[in-house]
Image (spheres, grey):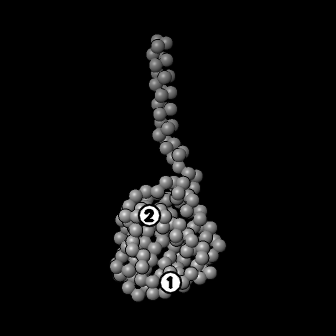
Amino acid sequence: MQHIFNAIILFILFLALSCSSCTHADTNMPSCINERTRQTIIRWGNYDVNSGKLHSYQFTGSLALATVHRLTYREQPVIDNIGAIKGEVFCKWLAKTIETFEDIQTLNAPGETARYVEYSSSKATIRAVWNPKYQTFGSKEFRALYDSLMTLIPDRNLWETK
């Protein structure tokens, strides 16, 4: 009888330990990733103001990295997943993007071609837009953010940036 009791206790302990590791699979996730930030999208790229042609990239709180493109304003953007990013990378660039938008709350200076960085959450979407032909003082921080975000894209997935 004692052997059966010990076997049952060991079995219960085994189940409790194995289930606790299953239910806490997110313990390796950085603290910035939660239910709210999983809906976050950071998007950056170029678009032609006249035609609506768009070439951009994005990553999300679900850690997906993608290209985003369309040929005209009439089209819905096509999103093609190209990989994943690490949770720490997402947290770093989420914080930097939010910080940049807090420092420079508006930037809308497009030319024929516009470059942009966009932050989108379940509550709001904000976008900074500038003309890539000019390196103005007002776009300095967003240009730096854009250039840093571009380092996340594998060479094989880079759009031609003319």
Residue located farthest toward the top when viewing the structure as drawn: 1
Q: Residue at label 1?
A: 133
Q: CA distance from mark 2 to mark 1?
A: 22 Å
When the figure is inspected, residue 73 is found, relative to residue 95, above or below; the finding is below
Can you tell which quarter of the image residue 50 is in? bottom left
When the figure is inspected, residue 58 is found, relative to residue 138, above or below; the finding is above
Element on which disc 2 rests:
loop
Of residues 8 and 62, the one nearer the viewer is: 62
Residue type marked 2: Ile
Element on which disc 1 rests:
loop
Q: Residue at label 2?
A: 153
The mark nearer the N terminus, 2 or 1, is: 1
- The quarter in which the C terminus is drawn is bottom left
Count residues near mark 2 (Cα–Cα under 10 Å), then give few for <14, some for 14-19, many for 20+: some
Of residues 19 and 77, the one nearer the viewer is: 77
Residue at 39%, 71% (x, y): give it: 159
Count residues near mark 1 (Cα–Cα under 10 Å), then give few for <14, some for 14-19, many for 20+: few
**Percent of width and height locating residue 19:** 47, 36
Residue type marked 1: Lys
When the figure is inspected, residue 28 is found, relative to residue 35, above or below; the finding is above
Residue at 58%, 79% (x, y): give it: 139
**Position of residue 110 in the picture relative to residue 140 (left or right):** left
Is any part of residue 69 visible from this angle? yes
**Percent of width and height locating residue 20:** 51, 37
Residue at 45%, 83% (x, y): give it: 113
**Percent of width and height locating residue 86:** 49, 54
Is any part of residue 34 visible from this angle? no
